[in-house]
C-alpha cells in the first residue's frame, strides 16, 4: 500500500518557485507540437509520452521515423540515448529501498526516473524517513508524469497557433534548466568533476561516434571523477 | 492509430523501460555506503552532463532549427543570469524561451 501522506507530499513537491514544472511543461509542449507536425494523432502523442516519458528518447524516435529507420534501429538509437537511466536508477533506488515494501513498487515506479524527478529526489531524500521515501517518490513521479502528459496535449493543440520560433524557444528550456540544476548539484569534488568532465567528454566523443558519445563520454568522465574523488578522500 | 507509429512508440518505451528496470534489479544488491554506489552516482551525473551537451550542441528535432551561435548566446546569458540572481532557476529558464525565439527570428 502507498502511504497517502507521503504520496501527497511528493506530488506537491513540484509546486514552488524552483519547481521543474515550468521547464518540464515547456519541453513537452514543444514535443506535442513536434509530434503533431510529424503526423501523429492526439492519441498517439499522449500514448508516446505516457509510455516513454523520456524527452531525448522521444526526440530520437521522431527523428528516426522521419528518416524511415527500422524498428531495430529505433530500439538501438533510443536505448543508447536513454542508457543514462541505468546509472541514474542505481544512483537513486538504493536510497529508497526498504524491506517493508513489495518489489513491485520499485519495478513500476522506476518508470518515473527522469532528470527532473531524479534531481528533486536526490536533493530531498535525506529529509524523508527511509520507509516512506518510495511513497514520496511515487507521488513526485505521478506529478511530473502528469505535467508531461498534459503539456504534450497542450502542445499538440497549440501547434497551429505557435510560430516556429516560439516552438524552438520552448525546446531550449529543458537543457537550460537541467544545466542550472546540475551546477546547483556540484557540491562535492566528485560531482563537480563528473559534471565538468561529462560536458567535455560528451562533446569530444561525439566526433568519434555520435551514437555512443553519451555512453562513452559519460562512462569515462564519471569513472575519472570517481577515482580522483576517492584519492582525494584518502 | 497507424501501425508504424504505434510500433515505434512501443519499441521506444521498451528500450527506455529496459534501462530503468535493469537499474532497479542492480540496485537490490548495492548498498548506499559502498564504493560502487558512489561510482554509479558519478556516472549518473556525467552521463547527464554528456546528454545535455549533446542536446545543446548537436541537437535533433525542434532545437536543431536554431543555429549554433544563437544557442550558445542563449545558454551563456542564461548561465550569467543564473549566477547573478543567486542561483534562481526561474529567471534564466523563462528568459531563454523568449531570447532564443527572438534571436531565431532576427537571424
Image: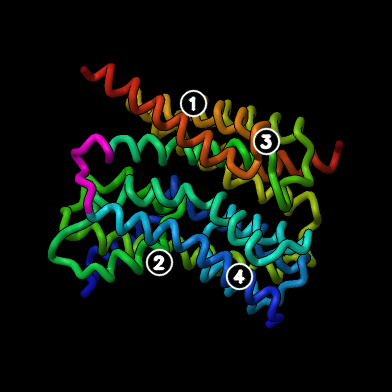
Q: Nearer the viewer, residue A216 or B88?
A: A216
Q: Is residue A141 magenta?
A: no
Picture quarter with the C terminus of chain A:
top left
Cα distance in 3D space between marks 3 and 1: 15 Å
What residue is disc 4 on? B9
Q: Chain of mark 2?
A: A
Residue furthest bottom as drawn: B1
Circle nearer the viewer, 1 or 2: 1
Q: Is residue A153 visible?
A: no
Secondary element at tag 3: helix
Marks 3/1 in contact by CB < 8 Å: the verdict is no
Circle nearer the viewer, 2 or 4: 4
Q: Chain of mark 3?
A: B
Residue visible at 71% across and 47% down in the picture: B63
**Main secondary structure of the magenta stretch:** loop
Q: Is residue B35 magenta?
A: yes
Task: State the mark number for residue A182.
Answer: none
What residue is disc 2 on? A142
Q: Is residue A186 left or right of residue B37?
A: right
The local crowd at label 3, few if under 14, some if 14 to 19, many if 20 or more residues have their Cα within 10 Å, is: some
Picture quarter with the N terminus of chain A:
bottom left
Q: Is residue A79 left or right of residue A43?
A: left
What residue is disc 1 on? A196
Circle nearer the viewer, 4 or 3: 4
Q: Chain of mark 4?
A: B
Secondary element at tag 2: helix
Q: Are marks 2 and 4 on the same chain?
A: no
Secondary element at tag 4: helix
Q: Chain of mark 1?
A: A
Amino acid at each position: 500500500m502507498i502511504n497517502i501522506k507521503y504520496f501527497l507530499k511528493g506530488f506537491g513537491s513540484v509546486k514552488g518557485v524552483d519547481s521543474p514544472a515550468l521547464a518540464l511543461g515547456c519541453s513537452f509542449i514543444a514535443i506535442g507540437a513536434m509530434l503533431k507536425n510529424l503526423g501523429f494523432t492526439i492519441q498517439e502523442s499522449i500514448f508516446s509520452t505516457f509510455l516513454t516519458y523520456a524527452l531525448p528518447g522521444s526526440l530520437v524516435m521522431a527523428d528516426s521515423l522521419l528518416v524511415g529507420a527500422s524498428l531495430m534501429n529505433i530500439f538501438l538509437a533510443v536505448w543508447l540515448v536513454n542508457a543514462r537511466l541505468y546509472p541514474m536508477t542505481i544512483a537513486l533506488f538504493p536510497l529508497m529501498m526498504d524491506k517493508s515494501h513489495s518489489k513491485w513498487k520499485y519495478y513500476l515506479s522506476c518508470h518515473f526516473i527522469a532528470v527532473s524527478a531524479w534531481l528533486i529526489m536526490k536533493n530531498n531524500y535525506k529529509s524523508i524517513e527511509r520507509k516512506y521515501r518510495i511513497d514520496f517518490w511515487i507521488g513526485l513521479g505521478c506529478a511530473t508524469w502528469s505535467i508531461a502528459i498534459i503539456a504534450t496535449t497542450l502542445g499538440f493543440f497549440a501547434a497551429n497557433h505557435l510560430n516556429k520560433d516560439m516552438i524552438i524557444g520552448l525546446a531550449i528550456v529543458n537543457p537550460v534548466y537541467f544545466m542550472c540544476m546540475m551546477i546547483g548539484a556540484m557540491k562535492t569534488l566528485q560531482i563537480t568533476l563528473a559534471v565538468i568532465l561529462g560536458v567535455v567528454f560528451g562533446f569530444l566523443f561525439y566526433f568519434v561516434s555520435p551514437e555512443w558519445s553519451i555512453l562513452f563520454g559519460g562512462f569515462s568522465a564519471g569513472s575519472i571523477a570517481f577515482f580522483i574523488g576517492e584519492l582525494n578522500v584518502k | 492509430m497507424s501501425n508504424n507509429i504505434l510500433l515505434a512508440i512501443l519499441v521506444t518505451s521498451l528500450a527506455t523501460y529496459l534501462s530503468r528496470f535493469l537499474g532497479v534489479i542492480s540496485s537490490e544488491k548495492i548498498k548506499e555506503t559502498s564504493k560502487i554506489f558512489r561510482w554509479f552516482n558519478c556516472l549518473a551525473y556525467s552521463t547527464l552532463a554528456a546528454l545535455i551537451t549533446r542536446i545543446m550542441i548537436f541537437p535533433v528535432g525542434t532545437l536543431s532549427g536554431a543555429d549554433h551561435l544563437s544557442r550558445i548566446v542563449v545558454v551563456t546569458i542564461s548561465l550569467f543570469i543564473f549566477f547573478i540572481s543567486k542561483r534562481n532557476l526561474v529567471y534564466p529558464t523563462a528568459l531563454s524561451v523568449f531570447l532564443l525565439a527572438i534571436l531565431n527570428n532576427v537571424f
